[in-house]
Image: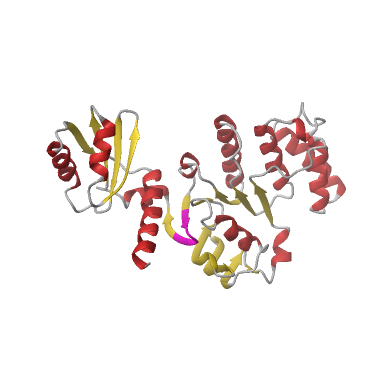
Amino acid sequence: MNDDIAIRAQGLTRRFGKLVAVDHVDLAVPRRAVHGFLGPNGSGKSTTIRMLCGLLTPTEGTIEVLGLSIPAQAEALRTRIGYMTQKFSLFEDLSVRENLQFMADVQALPRALARRRVDELIGEYAFADRQRQLAGTLSGGQKQRLALACAVIHRPELLFLDEPTSAVDPESRRDFWEKLFELADQGTTLLVSTHYMDEAERCHRIAILDHGALVADGTPVELCARLDGRTLLVDSSNPRRAQQTIMALDGVISVAQIGNSLRVLVADAHADARGRLLDALARSGQQAAVEPIRASLEDVFVAATRRSATSEEAAA
């Protein structure tokens, strides 16, 4: 296995009866990177993560994680990885310190090392004045910090995070991501599933799943560049009417209203999209300004997942 790759999956597939939850996914996650994992609900993200962790056996395909063959060597992997889910899963009737001590015991840290590590994390994760507080009485952001501290108690080489910020406020999410980048700077590899586009933009690389298939993979800059010429901004005095006109055109994938403007994503960068929009609006008696704009990661997500849905419909 390439020493620069923490995770490599080839042809990864998981079926539940007739349902194909993950469909021949090829994935490579570089070491010491924050790798984003995006996809609509039910796209196969959690199932993929469970297979990569060795918690679920693939129907087909191969997995290597930190040089180990999974699931055959899953037990050897367990002490080298951390796992954090979106649901707070620690003990609410134990204190902050007791939760950390318990996780140190689970990871079989020697007593002296465990005590030092717990003290270190209490300071690093800003729990010095709350270490005796019951976890169940913490705020959402504090619970999230505690869950992360528990997940890294044993200094894992690889950390899996399954939508870890779904129940916290924006400020807590921002602080949480600062912690993730600190971990990456220290050498930890992170695979983070999220449905927040602002979080995805922070990642070094991104993989997008849809209906179990990998539909996009690359850096945020690379993925956005692939949509050059396909995103336009429309300024109209009547954006709702303009939206109806534009959506009726062939080749328009989506039209989203942003304030008083419309953000338009089209299927073909080589067609005269601007001219077609201006012509359609003029024929319907509407005055509007149409200009090309840079694609966002949300545009990438919509283009990838809508293309997947269109392909399925064509095959049906």
Q: Is residue 255 left or right of residue 216?
A: left
What residue is drawn where x is 42% and y is 55%?
218
Judge whether 165 appears above or below 157 on screen.
Answer: above
What residue is drawn where x is 58% and y is 40%?
166
Residue 300's x, y, as percent?
38, 49
Q: Is residue 163 left or right of residue 110?
A: left
Q: Is residue 155 left or right of residue 184?
A: right
Residue 157, can we see it? yes
What residue is drawn where x is 67% and y is 37%?
145
Residue 227's x, y, as percent?
31, 50
Q: Is residue 143 magenta?
A: no
Q: Quadrant of the C terminus?
A: bottom left
Residue 206's x, y, as percent?
47, 52
Q: Quadrant of the N terminus?
A: bottom right
**Number of callouts in the render?**
0
| Magenta: main secondary structure | strand
Judge whether 254 appears above or below 173 on screen.
Answer: below
Residue 13's x, y, as percent?
54, 69
Q: Which residues fall within the magenta stretch?
A: 207-214
Q: Nearer the viewer, residue 105 or 196?
A: 196
Q: Is residue 268 left or right of residue 42?
A: left
Which quadrant would residue 243 be assigned to in this image? top left
Q: Residue furthest right?
A: 111
Q: Nearer the viewer, residue 171 or 305?
A: 305
Q: Nearer the viewer, residue 177 or 164?
A: 164
Which quadrant would residue 92 be assigned to in this image? top right
